[in-house]
């Protein structure tokens, strides 16, 4: 067995394959709405293997063709900009590809680890490194299109941009062929947020880089951190909030403001940004703050000692043998622009690096005439456990509202019409039998969120309730028979302030800026006040910030924001100690490596939250 300490990977789960193609796997690096990412070993080095979900690819030959085209583009990218493509099999079912493993942290992870915004010297370094990577990409006539903190990987010797291509393949395939565009709202450029068919350029990435720098300096994106209509309206019509950055580093604030110009023609190029940042050097080692450097050192030490993985002597993944992997097109050496090479000095050869990435179809945005914005949310993040239990592709959820949205508690139907959330079966309903005939569920503890409601196991039949709860419910898989797929709802928790501890990793719900996270239960942001409502639902207000936990829909990330609104902020206690959102009906679940999401309620330990004082 491979020792994974320091890698950032988790052990393989029972449903994970032992190998993909000819690459044996050691652990799971993450999972998202479009695929899973594994840690493997190929030719004596660690690699990150990305395997798309069968439910995403399906019979969509157009997607396969465009996916193959994006792999060709990935092979063209310079190694100083991203993790190099090492192998792929676009004809496999499902397709996969492997890149070098990056021993790093995403910018989002690094800021959370540091405990706040980065210091001025680290911000200039972030600008220099990111601008250098973008300059190399733009020189090839390519655009990233989805630059954001989770797609920027810090390393001991700089940073690497990740997640090229997959979202573009989805954007241009049958999944989103109606003039919509892919991107993350808080980091979109106005030309993306407006949904116009204007061709995107390198200026689009420069705008996103400005938003990323503001996030790293101020703790939140310059137009807000929610994923709805409000942030899109502000991106198009309002000026960014850069006051904290102006106080910290006025020169950098001026550059960021230029990056955030509404007119693409008014923004500096990546090369110009690189030249500005290079003048702030030299940047002495260690490049990043102490806590970040320590974690990066662990990652690098792991990458340096490649361990052997036992390769199975017979196929374990089922079905016909996989086709032999191809190595893709031979990368064509491309000379970087002279200004890029001059501005950033030659760096020593990097160790093999991990590319940790959420493969995702992200929120999709389009203007539908007048001032009305329509947002189609496709699944873009989920926990490994959530992905494992999903047997059917999730249908998109459309949300239509005015440019300045009004608060609402209504659920949303796939057709875009608002409708009340589905009501769960009454407590005490008989548990149906699950899809794998497992044992019956046991009752929750008296201190659980559900107040002791019993719940069936993921694959088992409903068992007797415990504590103050009622009889267990069967599995929530669409294929499971017996009861409704909605989770059993228990009595709301008593008013008070609590910590919510997860049954999978014993971490507690915390707040990191405008996002939810899981962390040390002793953290000051781990205490949440229950604000009960007359219908038995409640809001969870963070005692430290006064902001409320809110869902952005099923299979979406969970954020923290203004308690005055209701949309997504209404929660109910569910079976097995779960917290169920009225928006989409999903249960609060662990994210990939940080953050929380809402996933299909299935009674997993990762969805069990024990309430503690």
Image (cartoon, helix red, strand yellow):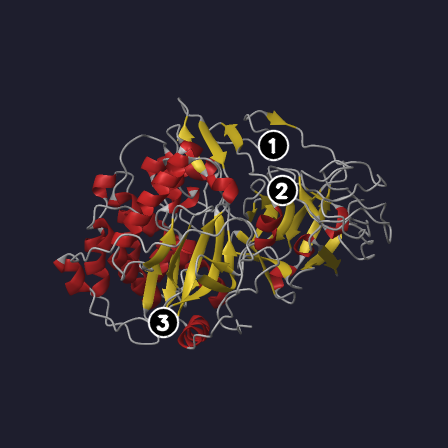
Indicate which disc residue 30 carries: none
Q: Is residue 152 left or right of residue 342?
A: right
Q: Earlier in the sequence, mark 3 or mark 1?
A: 3
Q: How many marks?
A: 3
Which quarter of the picture shows residue 481? top right
- The kind of secondary structure element at disc 2 is loop
Q: Which residue is mark 3?
A: 156
Q: Which residue is mark 2?
A: 569
Query: Which percent across, then down, holds residue 477?
Result: 68, 42
Q: Earlier in the sequence, mark 3 or mark 2?
A: 3
Residue 260 seen from this side: no
Indicate which disc residue 408 carries: 1
Foreground disc of the pair 3, 2: 3
Q: Is residue 42 left or right of residue 533?
A: left
Q: Is residue 420 above or below residue 129?
A: above
Q: CA distance from mark 3 to mark 1?
A: 46 Å
Instruction: Residue at 29%, 76% (x, y): give it.
Output: 284
Residue 74 seen from this side: yes
Q: Residue furthest top?
A: 370
Q: Earlier in the sequence, mark 2 or mark 1?
A: 1
């Amino acid at each position: 067995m491979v020792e994974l300490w320091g890698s950032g990977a988790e052990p393989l789960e029972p449903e994970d394959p032992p190998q993909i193609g000819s690459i044996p796997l050691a652990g799971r690096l993450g999972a998202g709405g479009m695929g899973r990412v594994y840690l493997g070993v190929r030719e004596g080095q660690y690699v990150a293997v990305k395997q798309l979900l069968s439910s995403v690819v399906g019979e969509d030959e157009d997607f396969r063709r465009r996916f193959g085209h994006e792999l060709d583009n990935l092979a063209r990218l310079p190694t100083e900009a991203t993790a190099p493509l090492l192998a792929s099999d676009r004809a496999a079912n499902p397709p996969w590809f492997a890149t070098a493993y990056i021993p790093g942290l995403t910018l989002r992870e690094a800021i959370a680890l540091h405990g706040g915004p980065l210091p001025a010297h680290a911000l200039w370094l972030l600008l220099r490194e990111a601008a250098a990577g973008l300059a190399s990409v733009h020189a090839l006539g390519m655009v990233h299109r989805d630059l954001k903190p989770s797609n920027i990987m810090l390393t001991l010797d700089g940073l690497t941009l990740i997640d090229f291509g997959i979202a573009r393949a989805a954007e241009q395939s049958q999944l989103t062929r109606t003039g919509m565009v892919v991107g993350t709202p808080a980091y979109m450029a106005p030309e993306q947020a407006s949904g116009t068919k204007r061709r995107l350029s390198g200026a689009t990435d420069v705008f996103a880089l400005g938003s990323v720098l503001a996030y790293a300096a101020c703790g939140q994106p310059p137009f807000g951190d929610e994923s709805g209509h409000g942030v899109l309206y502000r991106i198009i019509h309002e000026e960014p909030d850069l006051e904290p950055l102006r106080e910290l580093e006025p020169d950098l604030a001026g550059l960021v403001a230029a990056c955030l110009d509404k007119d693409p023609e008014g923004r500096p190029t990546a090369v110009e940004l690189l030249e500005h940042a290079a003048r702030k050097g030299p940047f002495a080692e260690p490049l990043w703050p102490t806590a970040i450097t320590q974690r990066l050192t662990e990652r690098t030490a792991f990458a340096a000692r490649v361990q052997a993985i036992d390769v199975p002597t017979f196929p374990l993944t089922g079905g016909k043998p996989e086709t032999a992997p191809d190595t893709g097109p031979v990368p064509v050496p491309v000379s970087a622009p002279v200004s890029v090479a001059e501005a950033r000095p030659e760096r020593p050869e990097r160790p093999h690096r991990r590319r940790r990435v959420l493969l995702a179809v992200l929120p999709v945005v389009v203007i539908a005439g007048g001032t009305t914005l329509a947002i189609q949310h496709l699944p873009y993040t989920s926990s490994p456990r959530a992905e494992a239990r999903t047997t059917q592709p999730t249908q998109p959820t459309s949300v239509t509202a005015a440019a300045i949205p009004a608060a609402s508690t209504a659920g949303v139907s796939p057709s875009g019409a608002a409708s009340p959330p589905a009501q769960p079966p009454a407590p005490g309903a008989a548990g149906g039998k699950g899809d794998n005939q497992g044992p019956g569920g046991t009752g929750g503890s008296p201190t659980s969120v559900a107040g002791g409601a019993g719940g069936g196991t993921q694959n088992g039949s409903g068992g007797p309730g415990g504590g103050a709860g009622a009889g267990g419910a069967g599995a929530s898989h669409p294929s499971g028979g017996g009861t409704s797929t909605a989770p059993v709802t228990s009595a709301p928790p008593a008013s008070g302030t609590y910590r919510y501890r997860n049954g999978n990793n014993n971490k507690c719900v915390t707040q990191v800026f405008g996002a939810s996270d899981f962390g040390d239960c002793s953290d000051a942001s781990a205490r949440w006040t229950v604000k009960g409502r007359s219908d038995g639902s409640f809001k969870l207000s963070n005692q430290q910030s006064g902001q409320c936990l809110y869902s952005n829909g099923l299979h979406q990330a969970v954020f923290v924001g203004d308690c005055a609104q209701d949309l997504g902020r209404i929660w109910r206690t569910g079976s097995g100690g779960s917290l169920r959102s009225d928006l989409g009906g999903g249960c609060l679940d662990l994210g990939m490596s940080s953050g929380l999401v809402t996933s299909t309620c299935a009674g997993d330990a990762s969805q069990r939250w024990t309430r503690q004082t």
